[in-house]
Image: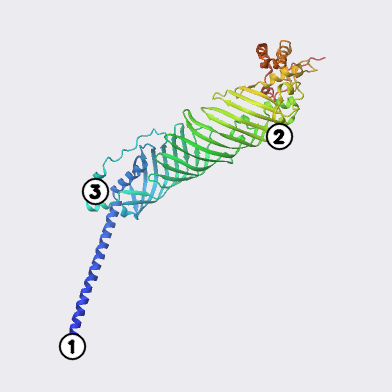
Amino acid sequence: MLPEMSRRSRRRRGKTVRKGSWWVRGLLAVLVLAAVAMGGGYLWLKSWLHSEDFRAMLSAKVGEALGADAAFGPFQWDGTLVKCRSFNASGGTVVGDVDARGLSIDIGLDEIGDRVVLLQDARINQIEAFFDLTGQGEPAPPADPRTPAEDAGREADRAWYEKWIPNDVRLTQLEVGHSLLRLGLESGEIRFSDTRWSATPGQSRGSYEAVGRGGQVTFPWGIVPELRLDETRMRYQDGTLFLIDSAFRLYERGYATMTGEASGDGYSFDGSLADVMADEVLPEDWRQKVAGRLEGDFSVTEVRDGPSVSGSVRFHDGVLTALPVLDALGAYGGNPRFRRLTLSEASTDFLWEAGALTISNLKLGSEGLMRVEGRLRVEKDERIDGRFRIGLTPGTLARIPGAETKVFLPGERGLLWTHLHVTGTLDDPQEDLTERLIAAAGMRMFEVLPETGERVLKFTRRVISPDTVGKLTGEDGLIGQGRDLLDSGQKLLDGDGEVIENAGDVLQKGTDAVREVGGIFDFFDREDEEPDAERPERQPQ
């Protein structure tokens, strides 16, 4: 009995073992087939990546992102790392031309299931690119006119394996070693030279963010100097370049920041500057006369005639030295502080547009001595027109009779004030203060040289010819009629037309005399000449 049961048990166990072995064999077969399929798929994918189809697809997708025709040079593969000697793009609305050299890209397959190829750790040794931000570039390549239904039908007609071919690429990061980036505007080009860039995709599709470091930045506007770039952050989206923030160095130790945007509709930038020395921005003939440190804010916008630059400037530790108008005031008042004037306050607003410069809200002050307020316009041809108020502390011009009673009058801040009108050109400025001082003081503005008997204008020692003295001092001369004009001010307020007629005669008769005497600016332009250069030699007694 027992042996028979043992034989039946062995038969059942044999059947169980044989049945379980088939499951194991089937699972192993599936795994083998999967491995073969995966290996075959990998080999097929590798073959496709190394084909011209992949290079053409990559060129098309990058060109679509740039809105231009793009093409990669031949690829050289090392595993998943591809190297390419050149890349070119051109013909777009914004992307005018791109020429890149020495490319390397690590191809990522993490999103291959979504038919996306990742461009990881892309690097470019050198690139030159021009972006046309004027809105006048060539039109972008037309979009594919096929409808979604046509796309679906075309997809169905493909072989089954073609449905797994990647049809999109995504850039994760791009590093650029050396670059020349040109941004075209209506008024010229902004150029970034020898700048290193790091670019990544933005949050919106088709947008990119970039960080640039080092190199030089030049602008098409003559009043903006070359800048040395510390760092800048930009974003490009839908044809507009946004300057998020940037930091620059200029001149020896100056510092500037800038933000803004530029597109085919125009541009607008705002910025600030600090620690710029006055002698670095002024013309050469003014560098020895003005010292100090500048800081300010500015805005640059596009107008019909080109850029419009406006802002405000503040002057710290300012010193004015050997300015003709200050020298004359110092000579008249006998105060040497005018020779080297230390400024306790100096600021102005400015507007540069169409080649003309307007300085407004000008405020200059030297504590306990003087204050100047007003505005000045310098035309493109260097003609000037300035109107100022000058305030002096009482007693400054006490040596000139009538100066502090008829020309300078009491006003705010405890100062004596008068107006000053400056005309002429930058090279030959003219002012109207001197003739008013002469008219107020009359003969007391002149003295006779004992050794020659010649008349000179007091304090300036400028020789005046007898004919000019006659024109100035005669009863019908400028001083005589000028004194009457000043003394008759009330008549002018009362509407007496005779005063106006007399004023016209004064200006007509005094024109030649004033030209010969000159203005305050002219007196000290000759300070290097000998005082007696215009005087005749004295005759021996």
Name the image quarter holding residue 489.
Answer: top right
Q: Amino acid under label 2?
A: Glu
Residue 367, which numbered label? 2
Q: Residue at x 75, y 21 (%)?
A: 402
Tell me where residue 540 appears, x and y as whole percent.
81, 15
| Quadrant housing the C terminus | top right
Q: Relative to 291, is 324 above or below? A: above
Q: On the rendered structure, is 541 left or right of 300? A: right
Mark 3 to mark 1 CA distance (whole Å): 69 Å
Q: Amino acid under label 3?
A: Glu
Mark 3 to mark 2 CA distance (whole Å): 84 Å
Q: Closest to the observer: 456 or 8?
A: 8
Residue 86 appears in view: yes
Q: Amino acid under label 1?
A: Pro
Q: Residues within 10 Å of mark 1 (few under 14, many from 20)?
A: few
What residue is shown with label 1? 3
Q: Relative to 86, is 401 above or below? A: above
Sooner in the amino-acid sequence: mark 3 or mark 2: 3
What residue is shown with label 3? 155
Name the image quarter holding residue 512.
Answer: top right
Q: Closest to the observer: 295 or 518?
A: 295
Q: Are marks 2 and 1 in contact (CB under 8 Å)?
A: no
Tell me where residue 436 appears, x and y as whole percent.
69, 19
Q: On the rendered structure, is 92 left or right of 254? A: left
Residue 386, which numbered label? none
Sooner in the amino-acid sequence: mark 3 or mark 1: 1
Q: Secondary structure at mark 2?
A: loop
Q: Residue at x 67, y 28 (%)?
A: 323
Q: Relative to 392, is 191 above or below? A: below
